Amino acid sequence: MFSYFGHLFLTTLYAYFGLTCRFIRNAPGIRHCIDLVNSILLAALRTGPLPKHVAFIMDGNRRFAKHKKIPVEGGHSVGAARLVKILTACYNLKIKEVSVYAFSIENFNRSEEEVKNLFNLLRDRLTTVTSDDNQSALDMGQIKIRVIGNKSMIPEDILKDLEEIEEKKKHYTGGILNICAPYTSRDEICYSLQQITSDASDGNIENVAVIDSDYVRDRFYYGPDSAHVDLLVRTSGVTRLSDYLLWQCNENSTIHFTGTLWPDFTSIELLRILVDWSFNRFLNLDDPESSQIFKSVPLDTLQKPPPLATVTKN
Ligand SMILES: *[C@@H]1O[C@H](CO)[C@@H](O)[C@H](O)[C@H]1NC(C)=O
Ligand SMILES: *[C@@H]1O[C@H](CO)[C@@H](O)[C@H](O)[C@H]1NC(C)=O
Ligand SMILES: *[C@@H]1O[C@H](CO)[C@@H](O)[C@H](O)[C@H]1NC(C)=O
Ligand SMILES: *[C@@H]1O[C@H](CO)[C@@H](O)[C@H](O)[C@H]1NC(C)=O
C-alpha cells in the first residue's frame, strides 16, 4: 500500500518535473540537478509495475540525416549509438526483454549500398557492444542476443558473425535483446505455417485441434519463450505498425507514437513514456491489483459519525 502511493507520488512528481525542466534545462548547473533527480526517479520507477517486454520501431534516421545535411549512413550511425543508450536504460530498469526493428524485409527495396551499409553497421555495433573487453559494453555484458527473422536473406559473411555473437551470448540471463532483421510479421506467420505443414506431412499432427494459437506462436521466429509485447514505441511521428509484431501485441499492449526522430530520442523521453505506462497500468480498474486499492464502499455501510463536539465554552 505504501509503496503504491509512494510510487504514485514520485511518478507524478517525475511527470511534472519533466514538463518544468524543459524550460530550465539550459540554465547553468541545472544539468547536474536533472541527472540527480533522474537517477532518484529511476529508482522510484523500479518499485512500480514496469513492462516486461518493450519493442522499438526506430524511425527517423534518414530524416535526421537530411535535417543535419549529413549522408544517410551518418544518420544510421547516430541512430545506432542512440540505441545503445536506450538499451542500457532499459536493462538498468530491469526490463527483461527488448525487441528492435532493425531491418524490415521491405528495406531490401532500398539502394544496394544502403542495405549493405545497414548490415555492416548492425554487425559492427553488435561486435562492439558485446565485446568482453570494452567499457561501453559493461551494461550489456550479460544480455542474451537473438537475431529474429528470415536469416537466409542476410549476406553470408554477416550472418556468420551474427550467429557467432548469438552463440556466445546464448546462455546469458541478464535480459534479452531481440534484433528483428530481416523481419516482417507476415513473413513470420508464413514461416510458422510452413513448419506446421511440414509437421503435418511428417505425420506428427494427429488431430487438427492441436493447432491453437499457442501452437502457431511456438513455431514463430520468436520461439516459445518470448513474452507478449507490453509496450511498443515508434518514433518520428509515423503512425503505422509497418508489419511489426502484429501477433505479439495483444489486447493489453500499449502502442506509443512519438514525433521525436530516433537519433534524438533520449532516455528521459523513454522514462516519461514508462511513467505514463506505469500510471495507466495502475489505474486500470480491471486489474485485480488496483481494484483492491480502489474498492468502492457504499455510504450506508459506514459507521454513523459522532455527535458534534466543541472545545469552546459555549
Ligand atoms: C520491392 O518493390 C517492388 C516494386 O515496387 C515490389 O514488387 C516488390 O515486392 C518489393 N520487394 C520487397 C521485398 O518488398
Ligand atoms: C570499445 O567501444 C568504443 C566505443 O564504442 C570503440 O570505439 C572501441 O573500438 C571498442 N573497443 C573494442 C576493443 O571493441
Ligand atoms: C526466407 O527467405 C528465402 C530467401 O529469400 C525465401 O526463399 C523463403 O521463402 C523465406 N521464408 C519465408 C518463411 O518467408
Ligand atoms: C489482459 O489483461 C487482463 C486483465 O489483467 C487479463 O485478464 C488478460 O488475461 C490479459 N490478456 C492477455 C492476452 O494477457
Image: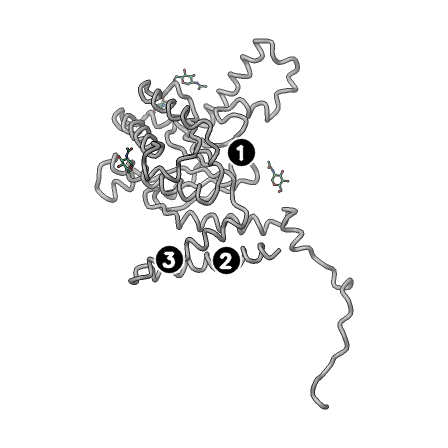
Q: Amino acid at mark 1?
A: Ala
Figure check: 90 above or below 24: above
Are dots 1 and 3 in contact, CB under 8 Å?
A: no
Q: Amino acid at mark 3?
A: Ile
Rendered image quadrant of residue 88: top left
Question: Sequence-wise, which precedes: disc 2 or disc 1?
Answer: 2
Are dots 2 and 1 in contact, CB under 8 Å?
A: no
Ligand 1: quadrant of the figure: top left
Decide if ligand 4 comes within 8 Å of the CB at mark 2: no
In the foreground, 156 or 213: 156
Q: Who's the residue at 52% across and 39% down the image?
A: 52
Rendered-image quadrant of the C terminus: bottom right
Secondary element type, mark 1? loop
Could you tell me residue 297's position as x and y percent?
72, 59
Figure check: 151 above or below 8: above
Could you tell me residue 123's position as x and y percent?
32, 28
In the foreground, 197 or 98: 98
Give the spatial CA distance, label 3 vs label 2. Answer: 15 Å
**Which label number is shown at residue 34?**
3
